[in-house]
Every structure is written in structure tokens, then in C-alpha cells.
Image (tube, rainbow, N blue to C red):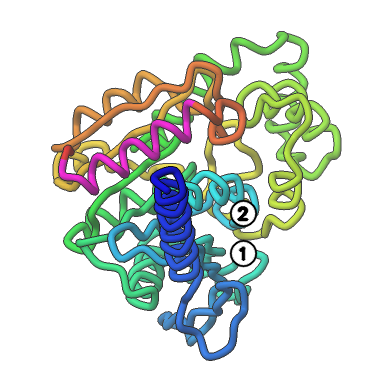
Amino acid sequence: MRLLLILLAACLTISCKQKTASTTLGEYFRYGDSIESAGVKMIPIKTPVGDFKVWTKRFGNNPKIKVLLLHGGPAMTHEYMECFETFFQREGFEFYEYDQLGSYYSDQPKDSSLWTTARFVEEVEQVRQAIGADSSDFYVLGNSWGGILAMEYALKYQKNIKGLLVANMVASAPEYGKYADEVLAKQMKPEVLAEIRALEAKKDFDNPRYMELLIPNFYHEHLCRLKEWPDAFNRAMKHVNAEIYTMMQGPSEFGISGRLANWNIKDRLKEITVPTLMVGAKFDTMDPNAMEAQSKLVQKGRYLYCPNGSHLSMWDDQQIFMSGVISFIKDVDTGKM
């Protein structure tokens, strides 16, 4: 009889646990939309030249942690950030993939006055309002150009942020260019570098040879070091808006020459008071020592170093990158940062 009671109690316990887990899982994927669309929404954005829409996709339902992912480029896509999906869903985070205006899945207006950092900052603020995030739950995670956007957003709107994460982006474009010239270029074979420089001197960037040289000798070394590039990254590369990318960044990741060439907010990092994670990587196009220094310039900083990573260390040093990012978010959430 006693054994029967023990077994009955165990079954009830398991049943309760399964019910709780099921309810929790159901709530996690309940977004309250009148029409279910797998979390995808086109969010209206007001700009000085008209109203447009940007693509977003929501994952999860967490009143304490809402993470907005800012992709690089400018004018790449959310696609290469799809690697966050399994990691963040396992943690129960609510997070948003998002194509910025001009990117493949969002509206792509042609007015060149739209492609400024200040205008993008206002776009991010409108997205924040649309997803209902605020300083009690809002985390901004930007990679590359997305890191520029994240830092600029924090400088204007940090009152709306709980945590800031800057992955693989220094706070000074001139320093980025200097590192490419004085450190990364010297790691190339002299004959390869000479041919690249000759094409650049002639501004012959559309010459197929330019990318033929850069992809194996620079991109595979410093952009993504995986032997086979992930499908998500290949799709993002295929979908880049080259017009906006070239206008703001320049024709390649090998230095910077567009509208962002003189961008520099290094002296303003001390104004950032929210908990901030700076992520650097050994093989990055950004100086990892500069990333570490930035973590000490903000008021509540932490540094994450990816010893096997490059510019996309969320892919080529994934376990260290993701565990460090997740630990930071959890520490901010529990008041340890």
C-alpha cells in the first residue's frame, strides 16, 4: 500500500511539472496577435521624407528581458543573426530580429538623405516603442555597424535601456581604418596586398578581381573564419543593399571610406551609464585591445574576449560568444551589473 501511494505521488508530481512546463511554453509563444504570423510584423516608421515599414520578427514572451538585434552593414540583413534563435529561446529570452530601413526585408526608399546615423537612431527608438520595451526590460545588441547604431542610440536614449551589448565594433572609424592599414594589411601576402591596393587606387571596386582577392585573403581570415560559411550568412551577403552599404561604409570591410569614415564617439563613451558588454575577438577587423579599452571607458562595462573569433564571432567562436552574452544579460537582469 505504501509503495502504491509513493508511485501515485510521483505520478502526480510529474503530471504537475508537465502541466507547468506546458503552460509556460504556451505562454512563451503567445503574442496576443489577432492573426498568427510566426511573430513577423512590419512596423511603421516615420522619417523626414515619408512613412515606411521595417520588418521585425518576435521570438518569445518575457516581461523582464526583451533583446533587439541590430545587424551590421549598413544594409545587411537580420539573416546572419539567426544563430541567436536557438540560444536565446533556450534561455526564455524575448528577442527581435529586425531589418533596418533599406535592408532586404524592409522598405527600400531611394532618398539618400535617409542614410545617416542620426536617422537610424530615431528608427530604433520607434521600433522600441512598437515592441513595448522600456528601461525595465530593454536590451540592445548590435554587431559591426549595428554596434555603431547601438552606441549612438544609447548616447541619446539610454534612459530607455536596461543593458547594452556592442559586438565587434570600435567607437572610432579612423581607428578602425588605422588598424586595417597598420595591422591587418601587413598580415597579407605582399603581392596580394599590392594588387588590392592597385585596384583601390584606380577605384576599380566593381572589378570581380577585387572580391576574388578579398574573400580568401581577408574575409575568411577576419570576417568569418568557418571553413564553410553558414547559410544564414550567405543569405545576408546575397541580400545586402550595396548602394547603401557603399554610401556609408565604403566598398568593402577592408577599412572604411563612406559617410562613416570620420565617425568617432570614443570620447563620449564615459556618458554611457547603463551596464554595457563590449565583445572583441582575436582575428576581428576591430582591434580587440580597443574593445577591451572601451569596456573601461563606459561607466558599467564588461569585456568578453573570443580567442578563436573574428568579426562574426557569434559564428566562429560561438560557444564563448553566446555564453558570455547570455551571462551578461542574466547578470544585468538579476542586478549583478
Q: x, y percentage for residue 171?
A: 34, 37
Left or right: residue 82 compared with residue 277: right
Q: Name the residue tied to disc 2.
A: 76
Who is closer to the viewer here, 174 or 203? Answer: 174
The three-letter code of the residue at mark 2 reads: Met
Q: Is residue 2 above or below residue 227?
A: below
Q: Is residue 294 above or below residue 59?
A: above
Q: Name the residue tied to disc 1.
A: 103
The residue that appears at 56% across and 64% down in the rendered structure is 99
- Mark 1–mark 2 CB contact (< 8 Å): yes
Q: Secondary structure at mark 2?
A: loop
Who is closer to the viewer here, 92 or 220? Answer: 92
Q: CA distance from mark 1 to mark 2?
A: 6 Å
Q: Is residue 326 magenta?
A: yes
Q: Report the residue that reaches farthest toward the right.
A: 208
Q: Earlier in the sequence, mark 1 or mark 2?
A: 2
The overriding secondary structure of the stretch rendered in magenta is helix
Q: Residues within 10 Å of mark 1 (few under 14, many from 20)?
A: many
The residue that appears at 65% across and 69% down in the rendered structure is 105
Q: Quadrant of the C terminus?
A: top left
Q: Is residue 198 magenta?
A: no
The three-letter code of the residue at mark 1 reads: Ser
Q: Which range of residues does the magenta coloring cover?
A: 320-335
The residue that appears at 31% across and 23% down in the rendered structure is 292
